[in-house]
Image: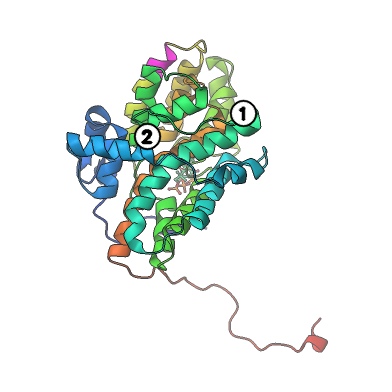
Amino acid sequence: MSKPKTAGLANVSAGTSAICTVGKEGKGLNYRGYSIEDLATNAGFEEVAYLLIYGRLPNAVKLNHYQNNLINLRTFPNELNGILELLPKSTHPMDVLRTGVSALGCLEPEENFEQQYDIADRLLSLLPGMLLYWYHFHFNSKRINTESMETTLAGHFLRLLKGQNPDELEKKVLDVSLTLYAEHEFNASTFAARVAASTLSDFYSTITSAIGTLRGPLHGGANEAAMELIKSFSSIDDVEIDLQKKLDNKEKIMGFGHRVYSESDPRNDIIKQWSEKLSKTSSEQQLFPISQAIEKFMWNKKKLFPNLDFYSASAYNFMNIPVALYTPIFVCSRITGWAAHVFEQRENNALIRPSSDYNGPEPRKLIPLDQRK
Ligand code: COA
């Protein structure tokens, strides 16, 4: 049976939004009217965060003030370290963030919707620290200081991860990557956040719903799965045969294809260039050519193009970021887009409650328990 055109709500408009356009004419991405190419080239991630959360680009004074505020908001509430220490080492880091956000919702609850901007900024500031405190505690037996004077989230993340001054190129690439991941219209996790917001639930619940949704390999988890795929090849010569086998087995090749884009993912062109630049500084000289070979094969065989996750994975690998942290980095960025959508939903709310096409049994009468077979 062929899938209906609207399966998984494909080709269905589920609401009106002024935040982002995705895939007009099969390509292209704009945040509040600014193209992703323009933003990734001419603005830093904090400008993009401000644009999404506050609705306009900051001037230099406002940006400076915003960055200082984000630095000040990095201080943990007292109880958070202990909570993160209690989560087992085997926890998936996405679950660490989901739990961390949930815990913050108990420690610093949203008492009224006027607090929503402050909570969005607080989460934006705290997420890297939450993730990396848990990571170092369990994997390096260290209780790290989760505060830093780094003016950017990219610098802050790299400093906490590596415990040293961040490399300038790595900082730049991570910053661009955060911009590319920040917002993407009614994707699954954003939609989950909007559904939660539409019940007038609290801000933290909308974000935990979104993190849980982003975790899956068909959505955010694809960057981790893409890295596993790339690393599974030791040479370009293996690519064609192995990928063909996967396609013959009807396996999905992670990091390829997209629900909305039909020609290309505009974010991919940008991160690919940066990944290539980083690859020149890496000892893993085969990894970028293998990625290109995968890209070429997938285009020739299936006319499928890489999405943002594919070359983000290799870029993060060249920065020596552990694979399990790839999707959590997506969270550290996408919190800005989720926040913008929660605000927008609350501003003009209608409960999101679609209907379904029933295909179960016709009405029937219950057989009493003692007569049932
Ligand atoms: N590898 C192999 N085949 C793929 C594919 C991929 N990555 N993406 C799509 N296809 C094929 C499907 O098998 C299907 O083929 P069929 O019609 O012969 O059954 C067809 O293309 C349509 O795919 P479908 O999954 O129904 O489309 P969708 O709009 O629901 O899928 C994604 C969008 C993103 C879920 C899908 O492309 C995918 O699973 N990609 C891999 C995961 C990923 O990278 N996710 C991150 C997205 S940013």
* Amino acid on which disc 1 is placed: Lys
Element under disc 2: helix
Query: What's the magenta bit mostly, secondary-structure-wise?
Result: helix
Q: Is residue 363 above or below residue 26?
A: below
The answer to which of 252 and 335 lies nearer the viewer is 335
The residue tagged 2 is 178
Q: The residue under label 2 is which amino acid type?
A: Leu
Q: Nearer the viewer, residue 80 or 287?
A: 80
- The quadrant in which residue 233 appears is top right
Magenta segment: does it hold 237? Answer: no
Determine which quarter of the picture holds residue 251: top right
Residue 268 in percent (x, y) is at 36, 31
Secondary structure of the residue carrying numbered label 1: loop
Structural crowding at the residue carrying mark 2, measured as other residues with C-alpha within 10 Å and reported as few (<14), some (14–19) or many (≥20): many
* Residue 176, image quadrant: top left
308 relative position to 232: left or right: left
Q: Residue at x 43, y 18 (%)?
A: 165
Q: Label for residue 142?
A: 1
